[in-house]
Image (cartoon, helix red, strand yellow):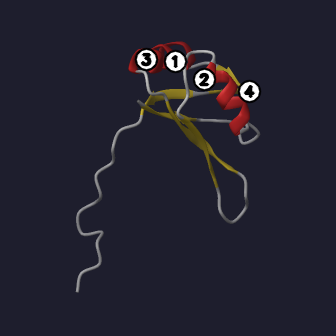
């Protein structure tokens, strides 16, 4: 299950997130989204946990937890459909 973690403090590292989520189960991946121009965190990340039960526990326990002074939000990442008309028309 892919999780979206929002409201991260800009100082929170990918390694800190890995450690935080690994206490609740197996991680498939952990990606802190970075600004390409500044190299700084954009304040959100994605974590993939292969076992749905572990992912649900992580959501329940970690959603609303304070990490580096910020109250994080953790939820299932929804597949966002591409906006209509966003494809270039010829």
Mark closest to the chain's N terminus, 4 or 3? 3
Q: Secondary structure at mark 4?
A: loop
CB atoms of marks 4 and 2 within 8 Å: no
Q: Position of residue 67 (x, y in %)?
A: 70, 25
Q: Secondary structure at mark 1?
A: helix
The image's mark for residue 58 is 1
- Alpha-carbon neighbours of circle 4 within 10 Å: few (<14), some, or many (≥20)? few
Residue 13 in which image quadrant: top right
- Alpha-carbon neighbours of circle 1 within 10 Å: few (<14), some, or many (≥20)? many
Q: Which residue is mark 2?
A: 21
Mark closest to the chain's N terminus, 2 or 3? 2
Which quadrant would the N terminus be assigned to in this image? top left
CB atoms of marks 1 and 3 within 8 Å: yes
> How many angstroms separate mark 4 from mark 2 (CA)?
17 Å
Q: Position of residue 31 (x, y in %)?
A: 59, 43
- 84 lies above or below 81: below
Mark closest to the chain's N terminus, 4 or 1? 1
The image's mark for residue 69 is 4
């Amino acid at each position: 299950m892919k999780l979206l973690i929002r409201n991260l403090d800009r100082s929170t590292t990918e390694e800190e997130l890995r450690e935080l989520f690994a206490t609740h189960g197996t991680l498939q991946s952990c990606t802190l989204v970075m600004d390409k121009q500044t190299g700084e965190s954009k304040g959100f990340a994605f974590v993939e946990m292969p076992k749905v039960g572990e992912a649900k526990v992580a959501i329940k326990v970690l959603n609303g937890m304070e990490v580096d002074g910020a109250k994080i939000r953790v939820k299932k990442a929804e597949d966002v459909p591409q906006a209509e008309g966003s494809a270039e028309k010829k």
